[in-house]
Image (tube, rainbow, N blue to C red):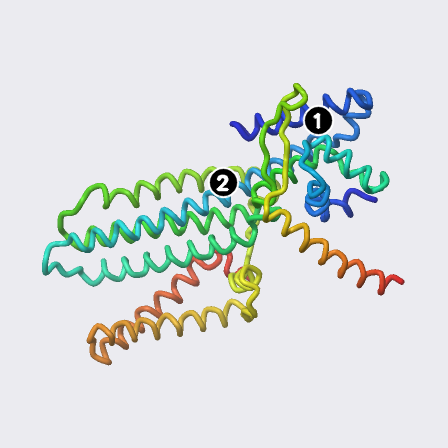
Amino acid sequence: MRGGARRRFLRECRDHLTAAAAARGEAEAVRAFGDPAEIAAAFDAEMAARRGVRSTFLAVAGVLATGGSTLALIHSASAGATAPAPWAVVFFVAAQVAAVAAALALVQALVLRRASMAAADVALLARRNGCALLASGLAIFAAGAALPGQGSALLLLAGPALVCVALVAVLRARSLARRMPGGGAVAVRSPLADLRHLTGLAVPALGARRLLLLTTCIAAAAAFVRDRAEQATVGGAFVTAGIEATAVVVCFVALGRALGIWRSA
Amino acid sequence: MTTDLLRGHLDRLLLSVLAEAPGHGYELSRRLTKRSGGQLEAPEGSLYPALHRLERGRLVASAWDAGDGRRRRVYRLTASGRREVRRSRQEWRAFSSAVNRVLG
């Protein structure tokens, strides 16, 4: 641990020991202070949690800013430009993965913002944030590759720049968490349980399979309704819904374990 | 009381002693020991990670103070911290009453 937080912590410990030694003698002051290794470990855990929460807020800001940059990019595309289907699929999937991973991280960070955080939870937070940032970067890259045009460099680069800053913060939190005992363990946190804790609402508890089924149905229905609202044919809307459902299942299987949604048997 | 038993309650105990008045870490540890009649003696160094955690949750705020000629970090409750103390007291009364009924 380096920097201002370390200096402040050491200063507080020194002040405490000085006052205690003056009142009770040095040997008693040191005994009452406790095991230095345990206290240092507790401080490391607190710093990791603090970095995890801060990097989450930064990551969410990065994802939102990249969303704004992506919208600016789409609006500045050449008139009549049409995105090739593969890039369009990559864009929609990456954008949704970014939104879901950022939402998972934000809910987890809000639930744990006042609590002790195990190293595995900080590592999970870092994975969720990292996934959100990488996916948002991929989304804007796909949009840029698919749609030629000209736009304001400031608007287009603001999002990716914030993503880079947030990624550094996430990597610092991850690095500290992995050095702590238990940092390599794979944590699983139910997003619905976190949501129930955060809102106090009676959010039902669902297992991974039922959660996947529910999410897939909602996503497919939303894709169908959106396509129909954009004057697509019923057949075309069904195809879009099928692609959406497939993407949800593939992402759930591929990323669910890393994002702490399910645990392998 | 064992350190393990105390550990799960350290945050609410610190908030409660801070509800009396702001204070620095050493002063808070003295207040904690005094108010518990000497029964609660957490390793004093463990107060600092707990205070930093409470500060992360915006339940306490801190600033350097040099009132008595020595520069010390003084902690005080925030408005959220005061609400948390009230909530925590109600929760503890209900919990301890239930445990008393079971243990007899």
Of A250 and A232, the residue lying toward us: A232
At x 77%, y 21%, the residue is A21
Number of numbered callouts drawn: 2
Which mark sits nearer the N-terminus, 1 or 2? Answer: 1
Could you tell me residue A14's position as x and y percent? 67, 23
Residue A79 falls left or right of residue B45: left
Q: Residues within 10 Å of mark 2 (few under 14, many from 20)?
A: many
Task: Determine which quarter of the picture holds residue A225.
Answer: bottom left
Residue A16 numbered tag: 1
At x 57%, y 45%, the residue is B57
Of A65 and A186, the residue lying toward us: A65
Q: Is residue A224 above or below residue A159?
A: below
Quarter of the rendering occupied by the N terminus of chain B: top right
Of B85 and A57, the residue lying toward us: B85
Could you tell me residue B23's position as x and y percent? 68, 34
At x 37%, y 39%, the residue is A165
Could you tell me residue A32's position as x and y percent? 78, 30
Could you tell me residue A219's position as x and y percent? 37, 70
Q: Is residue B74 above or below residue A135?
A: above
Task: Determine which quarter of the picture holds residue B63.
Answer: top right
**Label 1 sits on what residue type?**
His
**Label 2 sits on what residue type?**
Ala
Mark 2 — residue? Answer: A173
